[in-house]
């Protein structure tokens, strides 16, 4: 419809131009009535303006029909879902805390720790994004603790599968927790182990 109206406008404008060129107004015949020519030109101009108004109306109608239907999105997540997420986060925090305690009690096997640390550093060094990240690697008897500074760009989360795959043959068991360092700074703490990650045994009183 839009193109049809546009074509009519163009045709009308062309007709007005031909009329002016072919009319006695453009010739040397002095017998034609200039007032009649002017009236006809005014009528053509009025028709063009009317067609332009119609085109604007059609465009507005098309825009209304093609406008996307707004999708209603809940303003907030339901309280039940928020509570469930908070509970899961708390459970994960407690789980990682017991792993950290068990790691702190591990003795250090220098030979194993050296091999494991070298392997971890090799995985980071072979990836362009990971090699730029500040990290601290500490390996003991069968577990390594790796703390990586997170710059908030999302690159670290995206490279986590690469880390897991790169160490799957020597440190297949991984647990992770994000730690808030204050001042909009955070880090990711990984515990990577050659054995299933065990919770800390209760301390005997």
Image (spheres, rainbow, N blue to C red):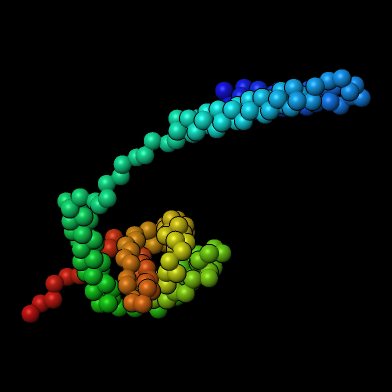
Q: Where, by quadrant of the figure, is residue 34 drawn?
A: top right
Q: Is residue 83 above or below residue 203?
A: above
The residue under the point 45% across, 33% down is 64
The residue under the point 10% across, 77% down is 204
Q: Quadrant of the C terminus?
A: bottom left
Q: Is 163 in front, or is 31?
A: 31
Do we see residue 191 in this rendering?
A: no
Image coordinates of residue 72 in percent, x first then y, are 31, 41
The residue under the point 27% across, 77% down is 104
Which residue of the protein is positioned furthest toward the right in this rendering? Answer: 28
Which residue of the protein is positioned furthest toward the left in this rendering? Answer: 205
Q: Quadrant of the N terminus?
A: top right
Image coordinates of residue 162 in percent, x first then y, are 47, 57
Q: Is residue 80 above or below residue 202?
A: above
Q: Is residue 177 above or below residue 21?
A: below
Image coordinates of residue 95 in percent, x first then y, are 22, 64
Q: Is 124 in front, or is 76?
A: 76
Image coordinates of residue 20 in percent, x first then y, are 80, 26
Q: Is 64 in front, or is 11?
A: 11
Q: Where, by quadrant of the figure, is residue 110 drawn?
A: bottom left
The residue under the point 17% across, 70% down is 201
Which residue of the protein is positioned furthest toward the top in this rendering? Answer: 31
Do we see residue 28 in this rendering?
A: yes
Q: Is residue 110 left or right of residue 118?
A: left
Q: Is residue 39 left or right of residue 87?
A: right
Q: Where, by quadrant of the figure, is residue 179 drawn?
A: bottom left
Q: Is residue 8 above or below residue 98?
A: above
């Amino acid at each position: 419809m839009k193109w049809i109206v546009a074509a009519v406008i163009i045709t009308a404008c062309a007709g007005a131009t031909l009329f002016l060129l072919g009319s006695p107004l453009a010739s040397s015949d002095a017998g034609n009535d200039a007032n009649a020519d002017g009236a006809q030109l005014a009528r053509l101009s009025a028709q063009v303006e009317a067609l332009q108004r119609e085109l604007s109306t059609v465009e507005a109608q098309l825009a209304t029909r093609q406008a996307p239907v707004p999708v209603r999105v809940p303003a907030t997540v339901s309280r039940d879902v928020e509570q469930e997420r908070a509970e899961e986060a708390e459970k994960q925090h407690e789980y990682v805390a017991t792993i950290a305690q068990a790691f702190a009690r591990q003795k250090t096997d220098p030979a194993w720790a050296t091999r494991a640390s070298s392997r971890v550093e090799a995985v980071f060094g072979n990836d362009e994004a990971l090699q730029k990240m500040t990290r601290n690697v500490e390996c003991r008897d069968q577990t390594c603790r790796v703390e990586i500074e997170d710059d908030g760009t999302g690159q670290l989360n995206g490279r986590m599968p690469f880390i897991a795959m790169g160490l799957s043959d020597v440190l297949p068991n991984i647990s992770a927790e994000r730690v808030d360092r204050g001042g909009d700074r955070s880090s990711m703490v990984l515990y990577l182990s050659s054995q299933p990650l065990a919770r800390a045994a209760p301390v005997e009183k």
